[in-house]
């Protein structure tokens, strides 16, 4: 069957295997007739080719809730459970997931494999910082419990390891108790990139923060942006039971004609959005679904970039080099006229001990680009800027990074490869991405 990630590029032909429990998964791994390389696949929300291989081991049926501890506010569940499903369980109890990405339709296994982050990394770190333990099935069929205290090296290799150490079977997630699932949102206007970064710095006490950038703005408007700060609403009525909410909106029924996506339409959109938000209300109350998952209510929104798909490019630069480096990136993007509807800047806090985890102290910028031949030389140029300023590119969003760029950005790759080789000596777990960047 033909499969692809959320960016719809690249596409690959693969066999899909769907084990219904740990026993059937182990039978696949220990079968006498070897079927070739394989990789786990969750909800298909990674953007590039990190979950593409000859054989895909789906976590679709590994989707059971196994236990819930009221006292410690922890949930143990199968790797195929989505973050959306966890929210359905924990919100009525006054709990919340401590880290949420831009979509709730991510599997727990995928969240660990990519060590996802959210709008609160500067305060709360990434997803795996809130994982108590998980069960990993190795290439040999052995089940291993991994945590920060048990099989520690394997834990730190698997968190952010893009599924290359084994298949996550289940995990125990720590939730947090919150005053409300609604958030008090405050917006700020920044007319330049330096002003935007200064505002993110001075408002680091806000639990959540994110900035939308007009990536086509240039000159003295370079980096103009709208910053969204938020806290859980402490003024809400605590007598009311918190309610899970699922917004439902339109579904994109067909691929947008590619000629409609150009620098003029994107420029008009970005200018209109900036001016609209600039004049809008500065404070409001928003339900969590609208604040954390602004695109989830649009079905198949990835079709907006046309039949050829799109590439999402996300990188991080250390604090001291971020202003100069991101300015160069934005200037290059604006000059090429290949801007993005979605350009997001966030502040990262300290890094964790996970070998291939993406976040490091500094700033991360995310850009979406329609796929076209002329895009790839531009991205190669952006890679040079990122590396020159001590940064790296996010593996969960990557679809074309070279081996040299990866290894320059992730200095712990050799330690990771040493652990992977130890637990997977014959290289069973492999993806198109891992082959491209020299890990398999």
Image (tube, helix red, strand yellow):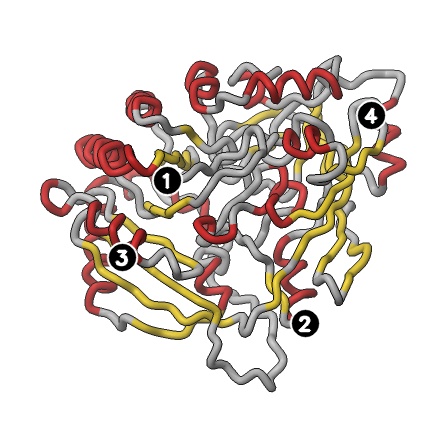
In this rendering, which labeled residue sits more in front, label 3 or label 4?
Answer: 3
Q: Is residue 389 visible?
A: yes
Q: Mark 3 points at which residue?
A: 226
Q: Name the residue under label 4.
A: 29
Q: Could you tell whether 261 is left or right of 131 in the image?
A: left
Element under disc 4: helix
Q: Are marks 4 and 1 in contact (CB under 8 Å)?
A: no
Q: Mark 2 points at which residue?
A: 93
Q: Can residue 338 be seen in this view?
A: no
Q: Give the vertical position of 405 relative to 315 (above or below).
A: above
Q: Are marks 3 and 4 in contact (CB under 8 Å)?
A: no
Q: Give the vertical position of 299 relative to 359 (above or below).
A: below
Residue 259 screen position, x and y as percent: 28, 39
Element under disc 2: helix
Q: Mark 1 points at which residue?
A: 362
Residue 117 screen position, x and y as percent: 51, 46
Residue 150 is tagged as none
Label 2 and label 4: CA atoms lie apart by: 38 Å
Of pointers 2 and 3, the one earlier in the residue sequence = 2
């Amino acid at each position: 069957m033909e499969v692809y990630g959320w960016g719809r590029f690249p596409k690959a032909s693969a066999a899909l295997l769907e084990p219904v429990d740990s026993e059937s998964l182990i039978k696949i791994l220990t079968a006498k007739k070897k079927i070739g390389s394989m990789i786990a696949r969750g909800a298909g929300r990674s953007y590039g080719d990190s979950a593409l291989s000859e054989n895909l081991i789906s976590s679709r049926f590994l989707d059971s809730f196994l236990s819930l501890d009221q006292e410690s506010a922890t949930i143990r569940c199968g790797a195929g459970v989505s973050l959306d499903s966890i929210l359905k369980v924990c919100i009525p109890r006054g709990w919340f997931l401590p880290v949420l990405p831009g979509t709730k339709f991510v599997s727990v296994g995928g969240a660990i494999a990519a060590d996802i982050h959210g709008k609160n990394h500067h305060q709360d770190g990434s997803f795996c910082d809130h994982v108590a333990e998980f069960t990993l099935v190795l290439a040999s069929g052995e089940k291993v419990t991994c945590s920060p205290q048990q099989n520690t090296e394997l834990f730190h290799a698997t968190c952010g390891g893009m599924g290359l150490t084994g298949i996550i079977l289940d995990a125990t997630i720590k939730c947090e108790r919150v005053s409300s699932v609604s958030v008090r949102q405050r917006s700020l206007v920044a007319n330049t990139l330096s002003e935007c970064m200064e505002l993110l710095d001075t408002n680091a006490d806000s639990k959540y923060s994110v900035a939308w950038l007009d990536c086509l703005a240039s000159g003295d408007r370079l980096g103009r942006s709208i910053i969204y700060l938020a806290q859980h609403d402490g003024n809400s009525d605590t007598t009311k039971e918190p309610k899970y909410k699922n917004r439902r909106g339109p579904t994109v029924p067909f691929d947008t004609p590619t000629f409609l996506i150009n620098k003029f339409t994107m420029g008009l959109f970005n200018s209109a959005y900036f001016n609209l938000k600039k004049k809008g209300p500065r404070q409001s109350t928003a339900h969590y679904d609208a604040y954390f998952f602004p695109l989830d209510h649009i079905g198949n929104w990835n079709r907006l970039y046309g039949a050829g798909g799109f590439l999402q490019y996300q990188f991080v630069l250390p604090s001291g080099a971020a202003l100069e480096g991101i300015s160069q990136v934005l200037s290059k993007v604006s000059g090429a006229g290949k801007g993005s509807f979605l350009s997001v800047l966030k502040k990262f806090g300290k890094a964790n001990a996970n070998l291939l985890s993406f976040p490091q102290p500094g700033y991360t910028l995310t850009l979406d680009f329609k796929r076209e031949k002329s895009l790839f030389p531009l991205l190669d140029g952006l890679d040079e800027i990122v590396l020159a300023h001590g940064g790296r590119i996010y593996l969960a969003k990557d679809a074309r990074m070279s081996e040299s760029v990866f290894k320059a950005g992730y200095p712990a790759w050799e330690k990771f490869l040493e652990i992977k080789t130890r637990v997977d000596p014959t290289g069973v777990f492999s993806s198109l991405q891992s082959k491209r960047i020299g890990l398999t």
